Amino acid sequence: MNMPKEKLIQVIILAGDHSFAGCRATPYLPTALWPVANKTALERLLVHLADQGIKHVTICSNGADSLLRRTIHFENHPKLSFLSQDLPIGTAGCLRDSVDNVTNTLYLVFPANIISPPKIDELIKAHNEGGSDLTLMFNPKPDDNGLMGEPADIYICNPSVIEYIPKTGYFDIKEGLIPEMLRAGKTIHAAVLQNHAGNFRNREGYLNAIANYLENLPESTIPLKHYNQCNLQNVWATTGTKIKQGAHITGPTVLMEGVYVSKGAVIIGPTIIGRNVHISENSTIINSVLWDNAQIGSKCTIQQCIVDYSARVPSNFYIEEQSVPFKPASVLNSVRSILESLKGNTNKIYCMLQAHFSKINKTLSEWIKLEKIKIAPSLALIFVCLAFLWSYWPGLKDLWNIWQRSDEYSSGLLVPFIAAYILIARRHDIIKQPIKPAVFWGLSALILAQAIRFFGLFFMYRSAIRLSIVLSIAAVVLLLFGWQIFRKAITTLLLLCLMLPWPNRIQTAVTLPMQRWATSSAVFCLEMLGYEVLQEGNLIHVGSATVAVAEACNGLRMVTAFFVISGMVVLLVKRAWWEKLIILLSSLPIALLCNTIRLTITAIIFTILSGEYWEKIFHDFGGYAMMPLALVIIVTELWLLTKLTTLPTEQHIIIIERQNG
């Protein structure tokens, strides 16, 4: 144990995804990202490991690696490797796929959903004292010091345990690895932690872990100060907290920045109030955690609850032992009021709509005159759209989060708008087609889309769930409008597939080769320009400057963005089908070429500029500058195709004869 820790210890973090959360606060937020004051549970664990001298960590993300990566903001964190699994492989499977097969390495397995992780030295000491190949850590019982309580989900393993794990498939430590080792005559050791690790799986465990954390709050971990105004005891607050006179708060309670507590409000700890939370008059918060931007109405009681990000709790609500998710309350209330007004008033509403349609008709263009549209199909279309939004709202919200947090797929946000623009541009051809609903084929396609959706839900294959969104839209178009309009819109519907992120298996398979290609191609270009370049893995040494080609610089972001651009161009220009196919297929080499140019220019600029500020500005600007370059290349490609494929105009000689009269 005299070697440095980073050479002896390999840390594996089981981050999982939303399916691990059990009773969860928000459907698509992994428990690893549930906040603890100013940091998520995962970020707190990484800070703790960095302070303990750990230099490298493998995170088993189960498909949420992009989301997890975007939430890690602190500097000097350990080097991170993400293991993204398409299907669950179990805790032992994660250990098997994460190890480096080094004989003198000790493997430490942590859950990401942990609030107060133990020190590394404590774990190593417990493992050495047990003298076994595998050590399971347990939390102490609350009342009996030193006695074994609930499992802490922390494991210390010798390299020899890997031989008892199957090479492929699902395998769990508790249910698979431990029985297999016992059958082989190996010993398993159980040890008790000095303090509760604060691991949790659901709302109840999360609140209990928060309570234990606040009882022993280490002030050095959060920029807090005791709030001494209004005779508040055991209350910590950051700057910008506003507590009105007449509010009553008892600790332990943490108030983050921007919190507003109105007159008459009561807060009873252990409680954490997140950033920019507004608590209205005469509301009571008891043993709960309110996440950022939550709004609590007046005269509410929130007891032992988790209130989601940006959730709104209306006035006069009593909520106990629940998770309060974010909901678009205004939309749901509007839909509810419309449905209630429809009851028993069909004829009245029909006449009212007909009168309004006649007035609106006078202001509309000829191509969309409402006289040509029957009210019943229009209402059916509105109802189907609302039902689609209600059914797929979690999936659409998941896509929105991916577009906002993932650089690789941020271009997907533009795809629905581009598709809508293309349909408007083609409106003259579409409205000429008769509306003949294909009920049988439309319903069959919709059933198939839902079967794919439930397959994804059952096997936790989110790519199938997202694909079912596009398939359902296509099925609804076929069901309501028929085959002729469906054929006119099929290419636009296919364009919608570009708004979906790639399946994890495909992304994992192409990421590393693309990263190697980006590095090697940039090195080649620099050498052609006369620079002395040294390539070391994904590091490019140019003179005294070093450029790291990170995973995010592999070019996948440009590939997805250029596919969107090429798809838009192909659907808008009037060219032969084979010319459009060339444009579409060329988007991949164009993306790789632009990424190589960006990396080459970035490396050259880094030899001139110094300072992280300027380097970051140019790095980000270089990515945006490649979009106009890609458009120029595509336009040039169209021009070349025109020159190469358009035959010259034949010239006919006209002879004019003059006749003498």
Image (tube, grey):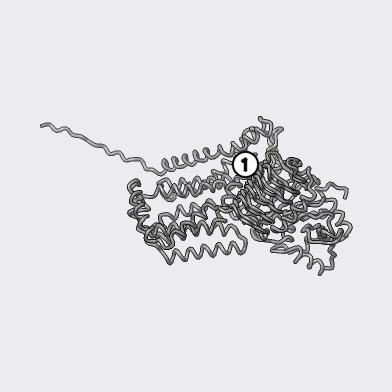
The residue carrying mark 1 is 521
Q: Position of residue 432 (x, y in %)?
A: 34, 54
Who's the residue at 50% across and 52% down the image? 496
Q: Foreground: 197 or 308?
A: 308
Q: Position of residue 625 (x, y in %)?
A: 56, 37
In the rendered image, the vertical position of residue 636 relative to residue 161, given as above or below: above
Who's the residue at 59% across and 36% down the image? 621
Q: Which residue of the protein is positioned furthest toward the right in this rendering?
A: 129
Q: Foreground: 192 or 615?
A: 192
Q: Residues within 10 Å of mark 1 (few under 14, many from 20)?
A: some
Q: Which residue of the protein is positioned furthest toward the left in this rendering?
A: 661
Q: Position of residue 522 (x, y in %)?
A: 63, 39
Q: Quadrant of the C terminus?
A: top left
In the picture, measured across the screen, residue 182 lies left or right of residue 558, that is: right
**Residue 145 occupies quadrant:** bottom right
Q: Is residue 139 visible?
A: yes
Q: Is residue 556 visible?
A: no
The amino acid at mark 1 is Ser
Q: Position of residue 5 (x, y in %)?
A: 82, 48
Q: Which residue of the protein is positioned furthest toward the bottom in this rendering?
A: 183
- Label 1: element kind: helix
In the picture, measured across the screen, residue 283 lies left or right of residue 152, that is: left
The number of numbered discs placed on residues in the rendered structure image is 1
Q: Foreground: 599 or 150?
A: 150
**Residue 610 occupies quadrant:** top right
